[in-house]
Amino acid sequence: MTANRIAQALPLAQTLRSDLTLTEWEAFCGQRLHHSDSDAGMDIVTDGDGYLLGLAAYQIRTDIRHGRVLDVDPFIAMDVYGRDRACEMLLEHIESLATDRACGAVHVSLEGVDGRFPRRCGTSFTRILESGYRADGLRLCKGISQPANGN
C-alpha cells in the first residue's frame, strides 16, 4: 500500500472499529509502511478498476513452534460482489510474501465479537480453511483500562 491509499482504505479498517479516526489509521499504517526493514508492511488488493477489495498488515515474528512466521493482522476481505476472489488474492499475496521471506508459517488473525467467530468474515473464513489454514491455537484478549491523564 502506498501513502496515497491510506485514506481510501479507512472504511475497510472501520469494519473492525467503527470509531477509528483517519489520524489513528494513518499512525497505524505509518508504523508498517515506514518500517526500517522489510519485516513489516501493509498491502491491498484491488479490482480491475482500482477499487479496494481488501487489505492485510503483516509483521515477521519468531514463533517457538514455526520459526519465522508472517503474522497477519488485520486481514480484511470486503469485496461485495466477489468476496471469495478478494480473499483468495490476499491469501496468495501473503503466502508469496512468506515464501520470499523464508517464513515457516503464516498466522492470520480474524476478528471475533463476544466470543463468536468469525466476525464479518463471511465466506472469507471458509475460503481460508479451504486454502489449508487450520486453527493452531487461540488468542485471548482482555482490554486494560488506562488511567485518565493527570491521575
Image: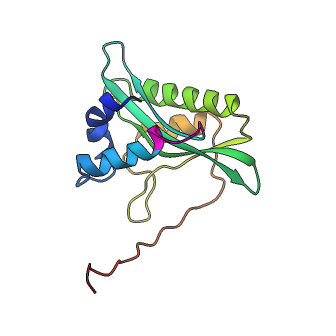
As for residue 34 lying within the magenta part, the answer is yes
For the N terminus, which image quadrant? Answer: top left
- The residue under the point 56% across, 62% down is 139
Give the vertical position of 142 relative to 22 (above or below). Answer: below
- The residue under the point 39% across, 32% down is 54
Q: How is the image coloured?
A: rainbow
Q: Does the image show residue 11? A: yes
Give the vertical position of 43 relative to 50 (above or below). Answer: below
Give the vertical position of 26 relative to 97 (above or below). Answer: below
- The residue under the point 26% across, 49% down is 23
Left or right: where 74 falls relative to 17: right
Observer-nearest residue: 101 or 15?
101
Can you tell which quarter of the image residue 10 is in?
top left
As for residue 147 lying within the magenta part, the answer is no
Give the vertical position of 37 relative to 2 (above or below). Answer: below
- Please provide the residue range marked out in magenta: 32-38
Residue 94 position in % (x across, y down) = 57, 32
- The residue under the point 51% across, 38% down is 41
Residue 37 position in % (x across, y down) = 59, 39
Residue 70 position in % (x across, y down) = 62, 42
Left or right: where 137 falls relative to 33: right
- Magenta segment, principal secondary structure? loop
Observer-nearest residue: 30 or 78?
30
Residue 28 position in % (x across, y down) = 38, 48
Identity of the residue furthest to the top in this view: 48
For the C terminus, which image quadrant? Answer: bottom left
Observer-nearest residue: 129 or 88?
88
Q: Does the image show residue 15? A: no
Identity of the residue furthest to the bottom in this view: 151
Q: How many marks?
A: 0
